[in-house]
Amino acid sequence: MTPSRFKKILLILAVVLAFGLPLVLRSPTYLHILIMLFLFAYMTTTWNLVGGFAGVLPLGHSVFVGIGAYTSTMLWLQWGISPWIGMIVGGLIAAAVGTLIGLPTLKMRGAYFALATMAFVEGIRVMVENIDKLGPFVLNGPRGLNIPPLPEGSLAAFQFASKEPYYYIILIMLLLVVGLTWRISRSKMGYLLMAGGEEPDAAQALGVNVTRYKVMAMALSSFLTALAGTFIAQLTLFIYPKSVLTLDLSFELAFIALIGGRGSIAGPILGALLLRPVSEFSRIYLSATLPGLHLIILGAILILVMLYQPRGLQEPITRFFDRLAARFGNGNGGTEEKA
Amino acid sequence: MLYYLQDVIDGVLMGSIYGLLALGLTLIFGVLKVINFAHGSFLMLGMYVAYWTVSLTGLHPYLSLILVVPAMFLFGYGFQKALVQPIFKAESDVREPITVIIVTTGVWYILDNLALLLFGPDYRALTPNPLKGKMLELGEIFISLPKLYGCISALVTAGALTWFLRATRTGRAIRAVSLDREAASLMGISQWRIFAVAMGIGTSIAGISGVALTPFYNVYPTVGVPFDVKCFVIVVLGGLGSIPGAMLGGVIIGLVESLGPVFMTATWTEAIVYGLFLLFLFVKPSGLFGVKYDW
């Protein structure tokens, strides 16, 4: 068994396990935690297309989550258009907005891009909070939008009576987006993007239109992030500006990616896998007695990882798996090669 | 007309204090080329130091500067040496390492929540406060005395900083490093020392803003957050790294905030601030006084 074969088998095992889990795990609470975990892994992976590969720091990706959530919900409430279609419409609007933010700012040094994305979220949030009606659409300002629940669920309405369908939808979305990232990272666009991210001047000198590729990555990332927004709206059936249009959410995505390891494919998933449970449990168990302690822990983890593992935690873990694979692959642990 | 004049004066006074805070941020940015996300938390820290000094000793609020300025300088100096410098050294090939932004964000989270843990979520008003509610009456115009003091501190600080950067050896070394690190190093300037000094000065300026704010603004653990975002807007508006830009940017934001509610609902004013910011970013990204060649 070769090392790469070993890794492939591990990967397939993990996917099979993920698909089989709801058959064993019947508790809706744990399923919900897993759904949130996959959701954050998905959003961080789409964040990573810009934040990882293009070498800039987007701090406003929640604006695309908000656009996705609000677009599909408004279309459903006002005109009864299926959220599945609204999802795509929201994605397209988000891609247009992402291009609009990216075009002027991605030309400049990183600090401007980080600040512009932040200001954009805050600006949009304040505006949504101030608008009750936008043309034919009801926005309800800070009170947000309720989607009337259909108790028996319906595929066309993107509503289900149990948690399992949501679990499978977000799992498939995550797998697709990870596959897409993998393809991009091995395509010409991916190489040019990384070249522009790491050595913009050198890439520019070699004739790469760095900004163009960054804007393309931004548009794609915005589109995919908005899809998660629709998913959140359909999962919670209630959205308001402070839930989907906040800096907190934007920062959390950046933190997960940076702790996991930005610019890698495993990083965002690993980051979500490590950070989500930590923040979930510390919030539940610590916040009552010691308010704010879970955020102190988060800040400390962030600083320690940046100081000692600036490429993220995926690096040592990948190394561990490589060694494991090499051991089994060299035949002293595996059986196939001896045969 | 008089009505507007009152708002204009309020806006200019408050805006100059915004400008003072932004001065620290823009200095740090000018030298390190990194946005310090913990700047608002440094303000919060300065406010708490001023608050405790005054409430424990009963001194005049502005006398707490004697403690706040050196304490905040040391804090900033240590922060740079302990947390930021190792990353700069590890990623010496990157001009503006993103990891530094993230470390400052981590420090922001830790400081704000440490304050929450230690002092609780209460909004604390300064006591004893000899400046409380004091007004200067000029005909029909009322000028808030604590805000006027804040404005004067801002002008004095900006003047002192300008003088320091122009006239002293260290000041000139700071400017040299912010223009070109390699060339400055070749001239025998230690960039690590300059980075730490700049961070120290920027942090103590945040402390001065804290002293200026406490007589009329409540202290609470997350007090830095709204100022943080405003500061980012101001430094981009004025031009990242520019001292007059920071002051003018602060006054513009102060005026928008004080005059905005006259013409529209107060909540829309906030949207105007961000709109102005994005407009500048798209139309004139170097800001009012920004250096052109660098960005």
Image (cartoon, coloured by chain):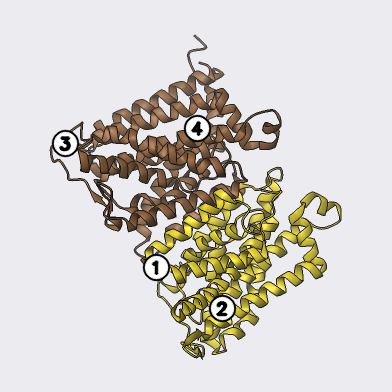
Q: Amino acid at mark 1?
A: Phe
x then y, percent, for residue A145:
25, 50
Whether residue A267 is visible, yes or no, is no
Separation of marks 4 and 3 at Cα, in angstroms: 34 Å
- Between disc 2 and disc 1, the foreground one is 1
* Circles 2 and 1 on the same chain: yes
Say which element carries label 2: helix
Q: Colour of chain A?
A: brown
Please name the residue that numbered disc 4 is placed on.
A265
Residue under the image location 46 percent in, 48 percent down: A60
**In screen coordinates, is B198 left or right of B283?**
right
Marks 4 & 3, CB-CB < 8 Å contact? no
Whole-angstrom CA distance, mark 3 to mark 2, is: 58 Å
Which residue lies under the disc numbered 2?
A: B212
Q: Chain of mark 3?
A: A
Q: Residue at coordinates 50% horizontally, 77% vertically from top-left?
A: B10
Q: Nearer the viewer, residue A189 or B49?
A: A189
Q: What chain is tagged by disc 4?
A: A
Q: In the rendered structure, which amino acid carries the disc numbered 3?
A: Gly
Disc 4/disc 1 C-alpha distance (Å): 50 Å
Q: Which residue is mark 3?
A: A153
Q: Tell me the chain of label 1.
A: B
Density class for disc 1 (Cα within 10 Å; few <14, some 14-19, many ≥20) is: few
Decide: marks 3, 2 in contact (CB < 8 A)? no
Q: Residues within 10 Å of mark 3 (few under 14, many from 20)?
A: few
| B225 vs B1: above or below | above
Contact (Cβ within 8 Å) of mark 2 with mark 1: no
Q: In the rendered structure, find residue B263 and report the number of the disc placed on it.
A: 1
